[in-house]
Image: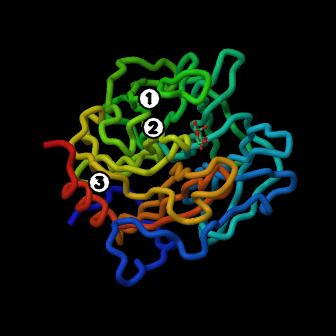
Amino acid sequence: MAKIIGEKIANIPWQEKPQGWRYPVWRYSANPIITRDNLFMANSIFNSAVVPYGDGFAGVFRVDYYSRDQRLVTGFSKDGIDWNLDEKVIFEGYDPRLCMIEGKYYLSWVNHTPHGTTIGIAYTTDFKEWTQLEDACYPVARNGVLFPRKIGDEYMLLIRPCDRGHTPYGDIFLSRSKDLTYWGKHRFVMAPVKIWESTKIGAGPTPIETDEGWLMFYHGVLTSCNGFTYSMGAAILDLEKPWIVKHRADCFLLSPHENYECVGDVPNVVFPCAALADSETGRIAIYYGAADTTVSMAFTTVDETIDFIKKNDLIK
Ligand code: BMA
C-alpha cells in the first residue's frame, strides 16, 4: 500500500469509481465543473490550480476573455466543486499552478514578456495580496511547477523550455534554488518516449509526495494529421533527487474521450494543472482543463495510480 505524505483533506471532493470501470482514473460524472458562464466576459476558463484553504478551497483560474487576453483570477469554494470566481485580475498570463510551502501559497504560471513566455512566481497568504518574485528563468519556457517543500536546503522547480509558438518539442527539466530567486544546478528529468506523448511533455499538478517517491502527473502531446492531442501521464520521481525517474507509465492515464474534452476552442485536450491529495484515505482529485474551454475533474487513489504505473513501467 502506497502512502501519501502530506496533509489530511477530510473534505476532499470525491466520487466513487463507477462499477465496472477498469482504469485507474475516472471522471467526475457532472463534468465540467467550471464553464465560461462562471465569469462575465469569459470566452473560456480552463487550465486552473486549486489548494485547500481555510475550511474549503482556493484557486487561481485561467480565463481567456472576449478580447482573448489571457489572465488569472482567484476563486473560492466550500466543496472544491462549486466555485465562486472573483472578477479581479491578479496577473496576466496562463496555466497557473499552486502549492503551499512553509505557510505561504506559491503561484507559478506562464508569464508573458515581450520576448516570449517565462515562469512567473508570486506568493500570498490570503489570496488577496500577492508578492511577485523575479521570473524563474529567461524566455522561453512554460509549465513551471514548484515542489511543495524544500529538498535538502533547496526549492525545486520543474520547467519546460520551449519556443514562442506552438512548440513542436519539449522535455521536462528541473532547476534548484536556495531563495526562489536564483535558479541553477539544472537537471534533465525526462523526454517523450511513447507515441501518445511523442511531440512534447510538460509537468502538470504540484508533485504529490508518497513513500514511493514524488508522484508527478504530466501532459504528453501527440501530433496527428488532425493536430495536437493532449493526454495525462504519470511518473514517480526519486524523493531526494527528483530528477531521477524511478517509474513511468508507458501509456496515458487520461486522454480526450468525452465530448467536453474532444470539442471546444482547442479540441482533444486534457491538461492537468492541480491535484488535491488526502494522506488519510489516499484519495486524489485532479483538476484539468478540457479542450481549452472548461475545468473538469477526475479521481484516483495513490494505490491505483502507483500500481498502474508499476504494471506498465517504462523504466526497466
Ligand atoms: C499549450 C498551453 C496550454 C493549452 C495547450 C493546448 O501550449 O498553451 O495552455 O491548453 O497548449 O492548446
Circle number at residue 210: 3
Under mark 3, the amino acid is Thr
The spot of residue 75 in percent (x, y) is 71, 56
Under mark 1, the amino acid is Gly
Mark 2, residue position: 202
Under mark 2, the amino acid is Gly
Please report the residue visible at 34 percent of the width from the left and 66 percent of the height from the top.
24
Mark 1, residue position: 170
Disc 2 under 8 Å from ligand 1? The reply is yes
The spot of residue 302 in percent (x, y) is 32, 62
Of marks 3 and 1, which one's residue comes earlier in the chain? 1
Please report the residue visible at 47 percent of the width from the left and 38 percent of the height from the top.
146
Q: What element carries label 1?
A: loop
Q: Which quadrant holds residue 134? A: top right
User: Looking at the image, can residue 134 be seen?
Assistant: no
Q: Is mark 2 on a helix, strand or loop?
A: strand
